[in-house]
Image (cartoon, rainbow, N blue to C red):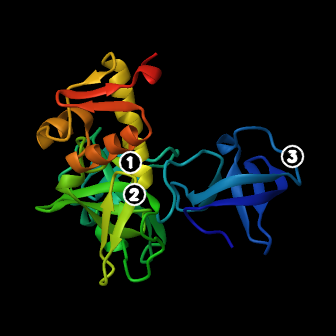
Amino acid sequence: MLTLGTHQILGVDRITEHGYVLKEDRGEEVLLPGKLADRKLQKGENVRVFIYKDGEERITATMQEPKVTLHHLASLTVKDLNRHGAFLDWGLDKDLFLPHSEQTTRLQEGQPCLVYVYLDEATDRLAASMKIDRFLDNTNLSVKEKEQVDLWILDKTDLGYNVAINGKHRGLIYHNEFFTDVSPGDRTTGYIKQIRPDNKIDVTLRPIGYAKVEGRAEAILEQLRRSDGFLDLHDKSDPGEIKKRLKMSKKTFKKAIGLLYRKDLIDIRDNGIYLTAAIAE
């Protein structure tokens, strides 16, 4: 079955003056126009194509690579605007339509915007939406605590930032979890910190548990190496100064230097921390 917005492996059934007629297992056919093939194909060859509708609303195959597929998120650039909506660059010869009804802010040409690709059942067309939250569902979760996940930063709230988790679920990163600047539309990696009884998800940008300490400990070692083996920070230093200079909380800093001390990699003194003589050499 040919599914709009997805990649499929299809066989070349025959070659015509317009391109290549591809056939799927059940016998359904689709045209791959010659201009949309990235090489000369042979009859019987299997090819990976993307299925979409062309400018005349015909189901078509292309070997062009889209920037996003059905049921996924992407930050796309606005190419054109008209009274019906916006047209986004998604890597294909035909732009992706973003209806006015699916926009949340006033757009301008050249502006990037975070969208979700869906199939409009009323028109049977692929479309984009900036109203991402309505496509996220926490009823049946596919993630677990401490798991590494893909994140898109959504909108800012009084508590922190709402995020889309793996393009499926909604979560929240609290303000005190941020040690670098982020903006809506940014994509990053995060970790499931807590799943609440009502399936609300707390997310952090830092690895959880021992792995977090190991990672932060290595960051401190690197900072010590760049600072000739001395760092004027210690367990009584101001939390704001630690956050500013090392991009970590004081709690994490103390755990990390404790780990480094137990491994005999640093000395902790009143004025700061030092690389031990062995590692400094």
Give the distance between the C-alpha atoms of the residues marked 2 and 3, in whole angstroms: 54 Å
Mark 2 touches mark 1? (CB < 8 Å):
yes
What residue appears at the point 44 percent right and 59 percent down from the top-left corner? 149
> Which residue is label 2 attached to?
209
Q: Give the residue pinned by disc 3.
A: 42
In percent of width and height, residue 41 lies at 81, 44
Q: Comparing marks 1 and 3, which lies closer to the viewer?
A: 1
Horizontal arrangement in the rendering, residue 191 relative to residue 237 (left or right): right
Q: Residues within 10 Å of mark 1 (few under 14, many from 20)?
A: many
List the residue tagged with mark 1: 213
Q: Are marks 2 and 3 in contact (CB under 8 Å)?
A: no
| Relative side of 54 to 17, left or right | left
Looking at this view, is 20 or 204 the one in front? 204
| Nearest to N terminus: mark 2 or mark 3 | 3
Which element is circle 3 on? Answer: loop
Is residue 75 visible in the rendered image? The answer is no
Tell me: 16 left or right of 259.
Answer: right
Disc 1 residue type (three-letter):
Val
How crowded is the residue under tag 3: few (<14 C-alpha within 10 Å), some, or many (20+)?
Answer: some
Image quarter (top left, top right, bottom left or bottom right) of the N terminus: bottom right
**How far separated are the C-alphas under marks 2 and 1?**
7 Å
Q: Mark 2 belongs to which amino acid?
A: Gly
Compared to residue 106, the image places residue 24 above or below, namely: below
Where is residue 69? Give x, y as percent. Answer: 52, 58
Specify few, some or many for label 2: CA neighbours under 10 Å numbering under 14, 14-19, or 20 or more: few
Give the residue type that dot 3 points to: Gln
Nearer-the-camera pick, 36 or 204: 204
Counting from the top left corner in percent of width and height, residue 264 is at 42, 35
> Is 50 situated left or right of 273 in this image?
right
For the image, the number of numbered tags is 3
